[in-house]
Image (tube, rainbow, N blue to C red):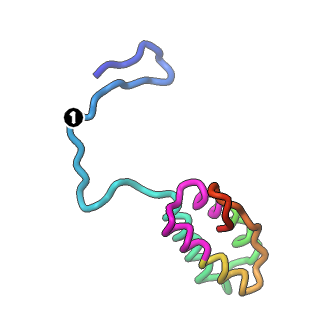
Amino acid sequence: MSFGAARDPATVIGEVLRYEELGGFSGLCRAHGAVLEAAVAVSRYRFLPKQMIESKWATWQEIVNKTGGLREKAAFEMLTEDLVEKGFKLEENIDTFGGRI
């Protein structure tokens, strides 16, 4: 392992000699967290200010679009449809594959 000469930012150069994944955990998914936050908001829509949900929705959707897989996108679409049926006005966002999410 060696360190670059520059002080800021530090650069570390190394080699992975062994990799092991325990318990199926391969890292955190921001989209998974965004879907979870959105699901909590949907489940509490009667108690939360409508503007708060609508304003955060675009942020959660952007995270799902950028970092989500098919499962996260499908789940978020179901949550979006549920809120639209309840009368919420959510900005339609287009994902990176050109489809509506």
Please give the residue where the numbered disc 1 appears in the rendered image.
17
Relative depth, front residue between 43 and 95: 95
Would residue 29 appear left or right of 63 to someone viewing this image?
left
Would residue 85 appear left or right of 24 to someone viewing this image?
right
Magenta span has 63?
A: yes
Query: Which quarter of the figure has residue 76?
Result: bottom right
Q: Residues within 10 Å of mark 1 (few under 14, many from 20)?
A: few
Relative depth, front residue between 69 and 80: 69
Question: Which residue does the image show at 51% across and 66% down from the upper left?
Answer: 70
Count all numbered tags in the image, as a single digit: 1
Residue 75: x and y in percent read 54, 74
Would residue 6 appear left or right of 46 to someone viewing this image?
left
Taken as a whole, is the magenta stretch helix, strand or loop? helix
Residue 31: x and y in percent read 53, 61
Question: Which residue does the image show at 64% across and 63% down from the upper left?
Answer: 61
Which quarter of the image is occupied by the N terminus? Answer: top left
Question: Which residue does the image show at 53% across and 60% down from the upper left?
Answer: 68
User: Which span is picked out in magenta?
Assistant: 60-77
The three-letter amino acid code for the residue at tag 1 is Leu
Would residue 5 appear left or right of 26 to someone viewing this image?
right
Question: Which residue does the image show at 74% across and 77% down from the upper left?
Answer: 50
Relative depth, front residue between 63 and 101: 101
Residue farthest along the top direction in this orientation: 5
Relative depth, front residue between 53 and 1: 1
Classify 99 as above or below 80.
above
- For label 1, the SS is loop
Magenta span has 40?
A: no
Which quarter of the image is occupied by the C terminus? Answer: bottom right
Residue 38: x and y in percent read 59, 72
Classify 26 as above or below 34.
above
Query: Which quarter of the figure has residue 57?
Result: bottom right
Classify 17 as above or below 93.
above
